[in-house]
Image: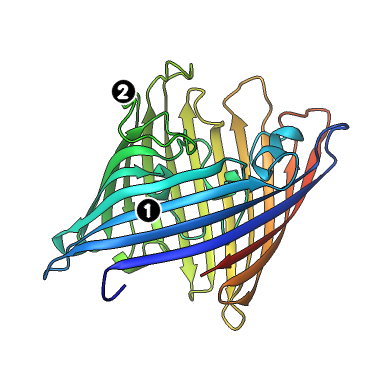
Amino acid sequence: REDTGLQLGVAYTALYQSADNAPTGVEDSAGSGIFRLSGSWELYRSESGATGKLVMSADHRHAYTEIPPADLGFETGYLGIPGLLFNDGGAILGDLNWQQSINGGRCGILLGRYDPNYFLDVMGYAHPWTTYQNLYILSNASIALPDWGTGVGIGNWFGEQWYGIGSVSDANGVASEEKLFEDFGELYSTAEIGWSPSRDRRYLNNIHATFWHADYREEANVEESEGVSIGANWTFSDTLMVFFKGGKSEGSAPLLNDSITLGGIYYFPYRSDLVGLAVNHGSPSDQSLDDQTTTELFYRIQFAQNLALTPSIQWISDPALNPEESEVWYAGLRMRVSY
């Protein structure tokens, strides 16, 4: 990296989940693995500190069982994803974008293929490889969340504490479709304003408001949707982080029209272990479905710097797709090896 500006990383993450109190005759267990190759190549650096780099990533996602964890929720009556990202999509091109910083790193521009969720409504606790696993805990599902697609984004710090972010991307972005600037007529647009006590504490201490709009998607027959969300997380003594996020939307593009999430994580410095507990309550955009509540508890055991095991329990109260049951449980075990 010092000689060429090139940095590469590899990781393999596996997840197995089992459902309890699922409907009779459905698949009640799921396992999946993801091999990821990622890297960046810094090709420009000025004396003022401005940089330009090419960012790349690629996955191979594969199921060990009849269905992957990403499908286990819908299979067992839960309107949600208990194992985010863990599907059987095969080989997937992820990031392929140029990231340019200017004005001494105070302003950044992004152009190319990327996942809008990496730069929208971001809080430091949300990492599907190392913390929670459930979609509703990791993300705000009242936002119509497109997948990897082509777009452009810009972010800027105004002073040392306030920042703004805006982006426009393909509303039809799908991870399995490796498109660049194709079918760019139906757009997903976002704007965010946030505050942090300092630039280097943004992911640890942050308050922000996010506004989004998704165009009508003709081929997918998904109506125009829009919404607003707020999020905040605060870290105490670099060990305990508490967080809150809520959102409200109109239209059928997101899974939820109303969503509230509360939770926290605690880091054990002497072991590098991590424990987290969070609760989400949401109202589906499908008005015929009842509200449901999601709770997730995990404990990450850090055996070594590059090896972790994470057992978890998820409790779903009033699963929206299975009104005959008052609850469903998911027990999970995730393993991650990285280099």
Q: Quadrant of the N terminus?
A: bottom left
Res. 135 mark:
none
Q: Indicate which label's residue lies in the foreground, 1 or 2.
A: 1
Residue 311 horizontal side relative to residue 224, left or right? right
Residue shown at the point (73%, 53%) measured from the top left: 16
Residue furthest to the right in view is 24
Identify the mark nearer the N-term, 1 or 2.
1
Residue 180 horizontal side relative to residue 338, left or right? left
Residue shown at the point (56%, 55%) measured from the top left: 35
| Rendered location of residue 90, percent (x, y) | 57, 43
Residue indicated by mark 1 = 56
Residue 235 horizontal side relative to residue 321, left or right? left
Residue 1 vs 261, above or below: the answer is below
| Rendered location of residue 41, percent (x, y) | 29, 61
Residue shown at the point (60%, 22%) measured from the top left: 286
Amino acid type, residue under disc 2 in the picture: Gly
Observer-nearest residue: 163 or 132?
132
**Secondary structure of residue under mark 2:** loop
Tell me the distance, in whole angstroms, between the alpha carbons under discs 1 and 2: 25 Å
Q: Quadrant of residue 226?
A: top left
Residue shown at the point (56%, 31%) measured from the top left: 255
Amino acid type, residue under disc 1 in the picture: Met
Residue indicated by mark 2 = 185
